[in-house]
Image (spheres, rainbow, N blue to C red):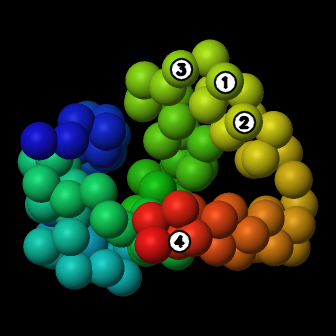
Amino acid sequence: MVKRFQFIRRNRKRKNLTIEQLAEKADVSIDLVARLERGEREDVSISKLESILHALDLELGDVFKHSKLDKKSDEFVRKFLKLDAETREKYTDIFLSIIDLKNE
């Protein structure tokens, strides 16, 4: 079970939102929010995750504040998030291509 997104539940409850209300506000499925909170899912698209986070007045970088990363990964994430959106998208495509090649 992945605990990475349990902070979503804490923030949802702080805002006095039900899972259903958060899902509606973020325009995502109730099932997605529930499974993320329970740690049963981590394969969520960035756009859906951003929608959930924005509905909670959070940012994408907040995910990494609640994840345990090693020092190098943490440095990578911090630098990556400082890039402009267009550059991040290009780098993401490159990184995914590299990972796909490694998995072949």
Residue occupied by mark 4: 100
Q: Earlier in the sequence, mark 3 or mark 2?
A: 3
Q: Amino acid at mark 2?
A: Phe
- Gap in Å between the C-alphas at discs 4 and 3? 22 Å
Label 3 belongs to which residue? 70
Residue at (74%, 69%) from the top-left corner? 94
Q: Is residue 59 above or below residue 69?
A: below
Q: Can the viewer see residue 69?
A: yes
Q: Nearer the viewer, residue 25 or 88?
A: 88
Mark 4 and mark 2 in contact? Answer it, CB < 8 Å: no
Q: Give the labeled residue for mark 1.
A: 72
Residues marked 2 and 1 touching at CB (< 8 Å): yes
- Give the CA separation, mark 2 to mark 1: 6 Å
Find disc 2 in the rendering and name its residue: 76
Q: Marks 1 and 3: in contact by CB < 8 Å?
A: yes
Residue closest to the far top: 71
User: Residue 77, image x and y in percent?
Assistant: 68, 39
Residue type marked 4: Asp
Earlier in the chain: of badge 1 and badge 4, it is 1
Q: Secondary structure at mark 1?
A: helix
**1 horizontally vs 8: left or right:** left
Above or below for 8 versus 18 = above
Neighbour tally class for label 2: few under 14, some 14-19, many 20 plus, Cα within 10 Å: few
Indicate the position of residue 31 as horizontal and vertical percent values.
12, 73
Q: Residue at x 53, y 71 (%)?
A: 100
Distance between the alpha carbons at the discs numbered 4 and 2: 19 Å
